[in-house]
Amino acid sequence: MKKLQITDLLPEERQVIEHHYGNQVHSLHSFSPKQLLYLRDITDDEKEFFSHRDSHHLTGALLQMLYKIKGKLIPTRFNRALNVISRHDEALRMNFCDVGNRILTVVFQERLEMPEVVYRNLENVQGEQLEDILKSLMEADMRRSFDPQNGPIIRFSVYHTGEDEYAVVVTGIQAMLYNFDVRKIFCEALDLPYKPQLNAVSGLRSHMSDMEQSVITYWKKILAKLPPQPQLPHMEKLDNIHRQEAFLSYIPHNIFAQLREKAKGNKIMLMSILQTAWGLLLEHTNKCDDVAYCVVVPRYMGKDSENSAQSIVPMRLIIKGNPMIQTIVTKAFQQFVISQPYASLGREGLTNIIGQQKPFFDHFLNFHDFFLEGVSYSTVPAEAYGRLVVQNSWDTRDIKLGIGFRHEEDQLVMTFSYDNTLYSPVSIEKLFRQYILILQQMLADWSDNYSIFTERLAKHATSVEQTKKAEKKNTRGELQNYLFKLDLLQGCENGVVQRFVESSYMISYFEGDSLPEEMLKTKLVFLVEGKVARNMENSEGWYNALDIKKENCWLNELIFLDEKKARVSVEVLTEQAKFLLIPLSSVQAVMSRHPGFAMSILKYTARQLEKYQRLWVQS
């Protein structure tokens, strides 16, 4: 691919580049620290993983890999290896920029901001507990987005899991990771010779030219005379800077038990019930009896995750006559079983078959992780060069909504990935509740006709809405109530609490999520609901367990220290946790005017000091 300089670009393209990366022509008065080595058009391989809705936003598919390494991996050496490889390998110095009519790869002379690396000690965790912790941490990491145009597009988490044994999680933009072997970094960190090998990353690409005519004919038949594109439920127009956000929910245990009973151990039948409920929700929202949507599944059902490329399977839910709910689900089951072997189209292939310029499918139900049997981290042998244990993908390019399903032994997890200009956490929660309502009604009316199901669903929905309105809480009053419960504010005059009502707010995080470091530096963070673990960095760079905190606890008492000796991280342990945030600036303003509040902080800190002194003596 031809290397370009800034002077080779069109004026409007050059303007976009200099907007993001500053002036690229050396001069005495205007110099950008983000100096580009060169630019180039993205390759066909890279193009497969990008889409852009407009000239202001670029979205790329994410890829995540878990490696198991044998050796002595020291944080300082890993950091040094990252710096060394960054200087020699352009992949770690690249970004991708949408300049209007094309996407360019931009390569910097030097990467000023190095990729994020988290180090944590899990030596004392074994067996299933270790598997569960790694899974929740990896899922939380995948929910964090990247900006392909600015900053590092890869990050690392290194977990010390045993003697000379490490789990390394690599998450990044797939367009870069597809042709970059992260084992280069492992070899540099462990002082091993690097041996190039075939890329272990399994791609998600499929080309129309590779498809047999029978496949094209099949999908033309299925996708013929499509109904209008369905309106997604609970969408709203929000004035946000566009990005994909995530919301985690759990299907209630009693409903999950009924689902397993109906599915009789068959995962495809279980998926058929879940995706039929979504189809019925779309029909209910759009007041129609014919909808089309897509499910995403592994290309090789039941195989281990190293061969877990994805397939997109379009589904059509058409209600004719007055069938039983069980019959509707059975037909969905049969349709999937017949269609899945033909699932070799990508998004562009589907668009071409349908014959529309704009993609018809704007959301996906992702059952990829739902079907994978996977490989247990504990049973895979560690290797000096790094053994790939599991590989995950997260592709939400140009879609309004993605719903991922994950089947665990005792629970069913749903992850909503949504466009934050169209959905908020509140509207996603409404969507989840309505989906659960339909699922519950399907199970209750399993052997009844569709007309009975819709009639009871309408009555049930009305009843739920009335109950919700009756129980609706005043947000301001709820916030004030939580503030009064905090130990830190006990004994303070009412005026102090009222001042914090104006500036504080609440936010939720999910299991495995780590609270942003910037939040812990700029806001007083209190745990309102749930349970969290605090980890503290030791002198070698590893994060070790500090303590477990429950409700109504202040989590970042060290916020007032300008120079901290060690960093503390906070990780959610329960399915969901709610936090109360008070800006540090507001607290400092109140402290200067209310000495009683400053004394309350001093007493709280003294009590914490006393607690840790007693623990130290007892240990």
Image (cartoon, grey):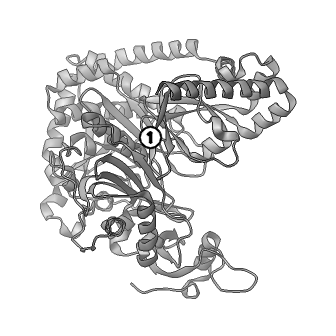
Residue at left 27%, top 43%? 369
Q: How many marks?
A: 1
From the viewer's perspective, tell me whether residue 517 is left or right of residue 126. right
Report the amino acid beneath label 1.
Gln
Rendered location of residue 318, percent (x, y): 26, 36
Q: Tell me which residue sits at (66%, 40%) in the image.
A: 559
**Which residue, given by chain and number where applicable, does mark 1 sit on?**
231
Residue at 65% from the left image edge and 21% from the top image edge:
486
| Residue 21 in sight | yes
Q: Position of residue 532 (x, y in %)?
A: 48, 31
Secondary structure, mark 1, is loop
Quarter holding the N terminus is bottom left
- From the viewer's side, name the closer residue of 451 and 109: 109
Residue 370, image x, y percentages: 25, 40
Q: Where, by quadrant of the figure, is residue 432 drawn?
A: top left
Q: Is residue 228 visible?
A: no
| In this view, 72 is above or below 485 | below
Q: On the picture, is 530 further left or further right than 361?
A: right
- Given residues 108 and 387, the one toward you in this image is 387
314 and 64: which is toward the camera: 64
